Image (spheres, grey):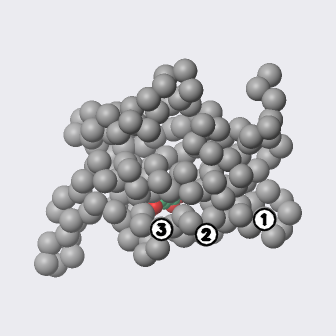
């Protein structure tokens, strides 16, 4: 974890670099607010699961791979912040093609959150575009371990 400014700002070495001028997360009291994060490879920052033609145009993507990559990135930011998967309390999921991708995404979600009583609250939105050519982005809020639940 890096919080060199003492303001709760987190930069996670194990997560892909943010694509703009924002931290991976901010701690505020017992809560941890994660920036929107996409399905990028943490080492190369390349988008996972995108298929391009010889001219470099995006021609296909694998939503399952993108789901797994974005969940891995969320986990990396949580762990760098001193939290874990079970500390997620609220997740907003943005999909660029709800009709095509909801079923596959929902199945991967169920693998990662098999226990409905321990899963975070979730809201899934279909939107026309994300800032980069990704099909899924997650926006998460977690409760830091040790914080009271009530
Ligand atoms: O491209 C990504 O990996 C995710 C980018 C997110 C943003 O730039 C944003 O939500 O502003």
- Please state the horizontal and vertical placement of residue 61, each as a whole percent of the image: 23, 57
The answer to whether the residues at label 1 and label 3 have Cβ atoms under 8 Å apart is no
Q: Nearer the viewer, residue 117 or 120?
A: 117
Q: Where residue 13 is drawn, which disc sits there?
A: 2
Quadrant containing the N terminus is bottom right
- Along the polypeptide, which appears first: circle 1 or circle 3? 1
Q: Secondary structure at mark 2?
A: loop
Q: Residue at x 81, y 70 (%)?
A: 4
Quadrant containing the C terminus is top right
List the single residue furthest toward the left: 54
Q: Secondary structure at mark 1?
A: loop
List the single residue furthest toward the bottom: 55
Label 2: few (<14), some (14–19) or many (≥20) C-alpha neighbours in 10 Å: some
Residue 23 can be seen, yes or no: no
Q: CA distance from mark 1 to mark 2?
A: 12 Å
> Which residue does the numbered mark 3 point to in the structure image?
42
Q: CA distance from mark 2 to mark 3?
A: 8 Å
Mark 1 within 8 Å of ligand 1, using the beta carbon? no
Q: Which quadrant holds residue 100?
A: top left
- Along the polypeptide, which appears first: circle 1 or circle 2? 1
The reply, left or right, for residue 68 in relation to residue 75 is left
Q: CA distance from mark 1 to mark 3?
A: 20 Å
Q: Residue at x 56, y 31 (%)?
A: 120
The reply, left or right, for residue 47 in relation to residue 56 is right
The reply, left or right, for residue 143 in relation to residue 29 is left
Q: Which quadrant holds residue 50?
A: bottom left
Q: Residue at x 46, y 73 (%)?
A: 43
- Along the polypeptide, which appears first: circle 2 or circle 3? 2
Q: Nearer the viewer, residue 117 or 67?
A: 117
Against 33, is 58 above or below? below
Q: Where residue 3 is drawn, which disc sits there?
A: 1
């Amino acid at each position: 974890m890096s919080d060199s400014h003492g303001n709760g700002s987190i930069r996670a070495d194990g997560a892909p670099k943010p694509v703009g001028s924002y931290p991976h997360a901010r701690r505020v009291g017992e809560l941890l607010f994660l920036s929107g994060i996409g399905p990028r490879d943490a080492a190369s920052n390349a988008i996972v699961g995108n298929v391009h033609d010889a001219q470099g145009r995006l021609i296909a993507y694998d939503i399952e791979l993108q789901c797994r990559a974005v969940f891995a990135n969320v986990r990396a930011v949580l762990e760098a912040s001193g939290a874990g998967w079970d500390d997620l309390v609220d997740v907003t999921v943005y999909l660029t093609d709800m009709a095509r991708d909801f079923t596959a995404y929902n199945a991967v979600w169920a693998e990662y959150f098999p226990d409905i009583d321990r899963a975070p609250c979730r809201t899934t939105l279909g939107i026309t575009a994300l800032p980069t050519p990704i099909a899924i982005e997650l926006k998460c809020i977690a409760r830091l371990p040790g914080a009271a639940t009530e």
